[in-house]
Amino acid sequence: MNAMKRSVLSVSRAAGRLTSAGRVLPSFLIVGAQRCGTTSLYRALAQHPLLAKPVMHKGVHYFDAAYDRGLDWYRGHFPLTVGSALLKRRYGTRPQAFESSPYYLFHPLAGERIVRDLPGVKLIVLVRDPVERAFSAHAHELARGFETESNFEYAIELEDKRLAGAEERLRAEPYSLHHSHRHHAYLARGRYAEQLDRLEPLFGRDRIHVIDSHRFFSQPERVYERLLEFLGVPRMDDPVFERHNGRPRPHPMPETLRQSLLDHFEVYDTQLVPWLDGDPSWR
């Protein structure tokens, strides 16, 4: 992020905090999973006139990495209530604010924090082939400078050691951050059912909408329609569906490694079937 953008963002956040009492809170969140098309879905939804994104940026990361800043800080990222009232008067339907922070799904405390601060909020979760997700995440973290091990196979061998005790530490020190938990959980973040099962007792299955990313990209209109129904928002636009944040890989994954990882994820993919009402597209 360049200096000018940081300055504008800082001013925007300061203004948001000062006017937080007059701002709306989100009605739904895209909580993950990382590298599963969250940015593409976010940008499609942001085109809807009744769906209000945060000011300045896609993800606020309040419930995972900035919870110590307080709810007023979080509220300051969203549109003013006066603007929301004008939209309701114009369209006859209450607008909804939202954000997209893909670490919420994996962070052990995020769900508890969300349900406490945003009662009634709905969650959207995108999932994809966890083998491809892991490979993509490694390339992503490497490009951003958060990963130093360039060999993907070795990076996943390091994962258990890197993540050892991470959840316990995050629970024991609620405002702490854990670099590897956020940036090196290549396999763990692909065990989607474990994360969904942690959220279900907090929100109920009827407030969690799971999308197979392959189906979103191959049948965007159909997936978009179902999502609007889940949100209770009328169809009012014809959004442009595009892929965002794709990263090229320097070389393909070895087939032996791919098969080994597919075998690893088989049981977890089976646990995902009830959430998708059918087999995942990659199985």
Image: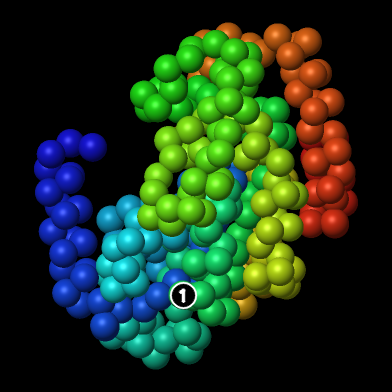
State the image quarter where residue 19 is shown.
bottom left
The three-letter code of the residue at mark 1 reads Asp
**As drawn, which residue projects farthest toward the front?**
172
Task: Identify the image quadrant of residue 145.
Answer: top left
Q: In terms of depth relative to the viewer, which is nearer, 279 or 109?
A: 109
Q: What residue sits right under mark 1 in the picture?
A: 117
Q: Position of residue 268 (x, y in %)?
A: 80, 41
On-image quarter of the N terminus? top left
> Percent from the top left, x then y, of residue 51?
46, 69
82 displayed left or right of 58: left
Q: Residue at x 71, y 69 (%)?
A: 201
The front one of 38 and 257 is 257
Q: Taking the image as drawn, is residue 73 in sight?
A: yes
Specify few, some or many for label 1: CA neighbours under 10 Å numbering under 14, 14-19, or 20 or more: few
The spot of residue 154 in percent (x, y) is 59, 13
Residue drawn at point x = 62 percent, y = 21 percent: 156
Q: Position of residue 11 (x, y in %)?
A: 13, 59
With 227 as the anchor, is 100 left or right in this view? Answer: left
Left or right of residue 117: residue 122: right
Would you place residue 208 above or below residue 147 in this image?
below
Q: Residue at x 53, y 40 (%)?
A: 166
Q: How is the image coloured?
A: rainbow
Picture quadrant where residue 52 is located: bottom left
Q: Quadrant of the C terminus?
A: top right
